[in-house]
């Protein structure tokens, strides 16, 4: 009995430690009714610093599906299934960084960003372009610390150490594919560092498949058609509008699915939901069909198809041609 009690105590201790790392350690239980219980969970460390626990994207539908927005003190993943969408995935993550920097500047906080990337990814997808980062997201060269690593172990170490520094408002780690070293244990360490520091860690995975990680939110990002640029005289048909992204919720705390097409305005540093030009539903919803089915045409009579003869219509055995032939001599 004593050994069993000790084993159960160790199991409970491990469960409490895992819950503490994931930020879901229950504080107390409240039973408002008989047979039911409500678990009140501890808030993440951003609340203790006087900041909001979530970063609002400015898109009501996306914020509602994520129960408030992107968590500010946690690990968040951004996925692209193909390497050609690396620019769109990194661009959407940097759009959230720009929103975060705007919020921190209002609170007189630090606004520098640490961006760590794998060398093989940059050889395949290209290096970041400094004038474009400053024009689109307001990241000047002095606000960005860029680091490349040949090995994933070095990139993970840099990300964990950068998450401790208070000079950074966010840490971005960009890798390619599904390396074996980036397992559940490694992502739990990144998530724990983000919780302890009270700042987000954005994990960008280019050309990767979804797998179990400790991230609270996983968003699948790809490029979307831009809407025509609008002027006072009207839309310009041949002009390319602002960058657009297709964002699909792959994982969240609410487990609510969602697909959004968002446009980034580099002048106002804001996101909004759009509907691209020449897009419509392929099949109207069953409850909102505007057209009734067409009326029936003229009824015509068709000839019955030829049927095979029945058993009563068959010819007698002696009248069949095959039996009129002379038999072969034995």
Image (cartoon, rainbow, N blue to C red):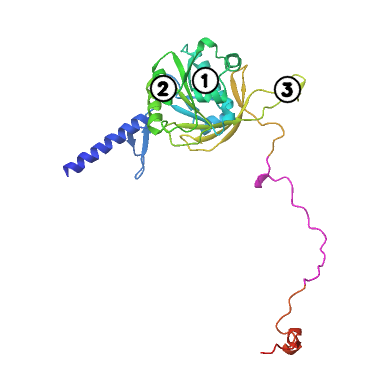
Q: Could you tell which of marks 1 and 2 lies nearer the N-terminus?
A: 1
Report the side of 224 relative to 152 (left or right).
right
Does the rendering let one see residue 211?
Answer: yes
Q: Could you tell which of marks 3 and 2 lies nearer the N-terminus?
A: 2
SS under mark 3: loop
Residues at circles 3 and 2 in contact by the CB criterion of under 8 Å: no
Residue 209, labelled with which disc? none
Disc 1: CA contacts within 10 A as few (<14), some (14-19) or many (>=20):
many
Whole-percent x, y for residue 306 in the image: 77, 73
Residues at circles 1 and 3 in contact by the CB criterion of under 8 Å: no
Residue 154, labelled with which disc? 2
SS under mark 1: helix
**Residue linked to disc 1:** 97
Q: Residue at x 40, y 27 (%)?
A: 191
Viewer-proximal residue, 146 or 77? 146
Please provide the residue range marked out in magenta. 281-305
SS under mark 2: helix
């Amino acid at each position: 009995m004593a050994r069993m009690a000790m084993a159960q105590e160790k199991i409970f201790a491990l469960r409490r430690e895992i819950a503490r790392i994931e930020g879901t350690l229950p504080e107390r239980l409240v039973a408002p009714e008989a047979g039911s219980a409500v678990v009140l969970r501890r808030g993440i460390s951003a609340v203790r610093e006087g900041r909001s626990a979530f970063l609002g994207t400015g898109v009501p539908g996306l914020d509602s599906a994520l129960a408030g927005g992107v968590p500010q003190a946690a690990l968040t993943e951004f996925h692209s299934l193909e390497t050609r969408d690396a620019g769109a995935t990194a661009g959407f993550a940097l759009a959230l960084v720009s929103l975060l920097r705007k919020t921190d500047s209002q609170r007189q906080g630090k606004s520098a960003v640490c961006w760590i990337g794998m060398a093989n990814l940059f050889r395949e997808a290209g290096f970041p372009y400094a004038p474009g980062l400053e024009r689109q997201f307001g990241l000047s060269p002095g606000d960005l610390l860029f680091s490349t690593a040949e090995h994933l172990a070095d990139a993970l170490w840099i990300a964990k150490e950068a998450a401790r520094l208070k000079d950074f408002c966010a840490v971005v780690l960009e890798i390619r594919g599904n390396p074996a070293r980036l397992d559940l244990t490694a992502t739990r360490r990144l998530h724990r560092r983000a919780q302890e520091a009270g700042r987000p860690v954005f994990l960008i995975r280019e050309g990767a498949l979804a797998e179990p990680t400790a991230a609270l939110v996983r968003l699948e990002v790809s490029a979307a058609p831009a809407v025509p640029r609008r002027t006072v005289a009207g839309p310009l048909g041949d002009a390319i509008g602002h960058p657009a992204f297709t964002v699909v919720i792959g994982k969240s705390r609410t487990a609510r699915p969602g697909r959004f097409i968002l446009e980034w305005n580099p002048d106002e540093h804001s996101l909004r939901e759009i509907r691209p030009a020449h897009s419509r539903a392929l099949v109207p919803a069953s409850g909102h069909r505007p057209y009734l089915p067409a009326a029936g045409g003229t009824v015509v009579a068709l000839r019955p198809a030829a049927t095979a003869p029945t058993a009563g219509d068959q010819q007698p055995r002696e009248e069949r041609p095959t039996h009129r032939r002379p038999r072969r001599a034995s």
